[in-house]
Amino acid sequence: MQTAALGFPKPQGGASLLLAFRAQRAVIIVGSNQLAASRAFSALEADYSVTIVASGGLDSACEEIAWRVYHGQLNFVDLHTSPSRSTSADHETQSLAGCLDTLSDVSLLFVTDTALGENRRSRASAEQIHRLCRERRIPVNVTDMPELCDFTFASTHRFLDPNTHDKTPLQIAVVTNGQGCRLSGRLRRDIVAKLPREVGVAVAKVGHLRRLAKTELQDVSAADSFYHEEDRAPTPNRPVPQRGDFETEAERTRRRMKWIAQISEYWPYSRLAATTDRDMMDLLGEHGPQSHTDWRPGELTDHADDSAVQSLHALGVPSISPSLTGRIFLVGSGPGHPDLLTVATRDVLTKHADLILSDKLVPQGVLDLIPSGVEVRIARKFPGNSEGAQQELMEAAVEAASRGLTVVRLKQGDPTVYARAGEEVLYFRSHGYESIIIPGVSSALAGPVLAGIPVTQRGAAVSFTVCTGVGRQGKEVKLPGYDRGRTLIILMGVARLEQVVETLVGAVDKAKRDGPAYPSHTPIAIIERASMPDQRVITSTLTHIVAALESGGAQRPPGMMVVGWAVLSLWGGGDVSVLDDYAEGKDLVRVEKWLAGESWRVADGFDFGLDGL
């Protein structure tokens, strides 16, 4: 074990434990004003049975409460007429206690008549109700008295189907933890305004697809296990064995759930929302979404018009090229942000392309630059299907070029850095087409820069090596050994992080590592979705990075790893004396100071900062 300074993250209070309750149990709402009606409606939508407890009968209740009681949606108890042994002023409290004891399955209680205004319940009465709930272990919320609240309400929004106006399963909630209730409403509205209007339908379609996948298994317990595998997996990019000639029912279901995880991550919301029953059956079929034999150029629709979606990704109508001989471009889209496209790549995408064959990791912001008259097809490289999908795209490129079209193979980063450009160049050449390669900004270099890590830095790193963590057809690769002055950049290896760390620090054979082992305290950074607004950087040591990644929540592919002393060279006041002042004890001090008592650090979000230029 390392020094005590390398512990776990320190909790910082002031947050809330955010949970989504949905259960067919009972809630009690004290009060019959409009706020009570709002609370009742929310509880009813979550399938709770609701009892309104108030004084004065229905005549004193708001119109909505009275209407819902009349139509049998709510129960109503008048505290003044409820039986009680007491004839004193605490009759109401005694009646409420009797009500709580009668309804044994009460899970929550809301007090709404303490809201600021006329006829406000006294604090002494509210404290009595709070005590009754505490004695019965019932969580309570007392309006406008936060010190008497076991839970608070978020500012929520439930999305509608834009065509039918039916409510969808998708809800979002914003909580300011008592720091600005009005502001939380504004934040919620801003978030809703930035999301596509069909996003709720997309959630409903994915839910239906998951249920279809679940019904494939006869064994209910096994089905439940696979059904929730998508939620348990930290990343949809977990390794999946290539599909063989024979699959068991369990193997087939596992693969399908992985496919669902990946389309949830990569498909545009508009495409998810437009998924038909036939699409779902195709997705769950032997070849995944839209098998090669089913796809025909020309069936794709305009990506700018979500009203007529037929293609895999709701993109593209082909235009007629005036050239008699087709061309094939291999271009790189950079790490992800559209502003990092080269001028040449942007021109090819917007001025010359007739057909674009895009990798699935190319973000929507880049695809949105493509004119609506250009046909676009997204690679279907889902788990277990990468080889077939690669062959499909290459065949599609040759077929389109033979019709005189200008074809663009759009790849993430640079097309020649682990993007299989070489295979495609040779394939196209064997079919009579010489590819035109346009370089892109490689994520291997841009990702570390955008995370504040120089790949070389005087005094910390004099060289760098780029390698992959995933070999051909998922095989293991040989990783470089430790060199104090070298930065190691590993692409596409985050899904195999535990295995990568073991290879770097462990006593492995020469087939896995070429050189000495890395010290376990060597700094490492995991960079996910570099240059995008949801970029995340997790920094730690090789000892703790696996725990850091697992504790950081759902992963955000694509991801990369940066290993070496350059990781901490620009942190704080900087440390560029690593190569000049070497001693293992000093290295431990460096790492402890860098992590400042925590075993890892997470940095969320990225602003490219060019909007105002």
Image (cartoon, helix red, strand yellow):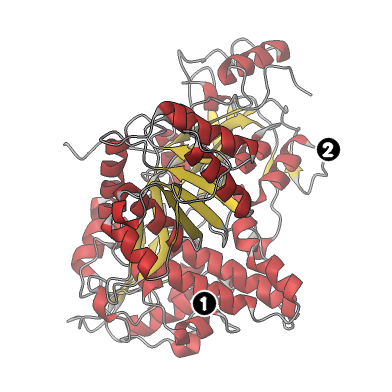
Q: The N terminus is located in which quarter?
A: top right
Measuring from the top left, give residue 552's x and y in whole percent.
Answer: 57, 40
Q: Which residue is drawn at 66% across and 60% down?
A: 239
Q: In this view, does 442 lie above or below 87?
A: below
Measuring from the top left, give residue 280's x and y in whole percent.
Answer: 49, 81
Spot the residue most to the front. Answer: 87
Q: How crowded is mark 1: few (under 14 residues within 10 Å), some or many (20 or more)?
A: few
- Determine which residue is flagged by label 2: 507
Q: Label 2 near label 1: C-beta < 8 Å?
A: no
* Quadrant of the image occupied by residue 405: bottom left
Q: Is residue 3 left or right of residue 356?
A: right
Measuring from the top left, give residue 592's x and y in whole percent.
Answer: 63, 16
Q: How many marks?
A: 2
Q: What element carries label 2?
A: loop
Q: Is mark 1 on a helix, strand or loop?
A: helix
Q: Is residue 75 left or right of residue 344?
A: right
Mark 1 → mark 2, Cα distance in angstroms = 38 Å
* Identity, as a three-letter code, of the amino acid under mark 1: Gln
* Quadrant of the image occupied by residue 549: top right
Q: Which residue is drawn at 64% across and 25% down?
A: 484
* Quadrant of the image occupied by residue 524: top right
Measuring from the top left, give residue 476's x and y in whole percent.
Answer: 71, 55
* Identity, as a three-letter code, of the amino acid under mark 2: Ala
Q: In this view, does 495 lie to the left or right of 351?
A: right
Who comes first in sequence, dot 1 or dot 2? 1
Residue 364 shows in this picture: no
Q: Is residue 182 above or below residue 274?
A: above
Q: Which mark is residue 391?
A: 1
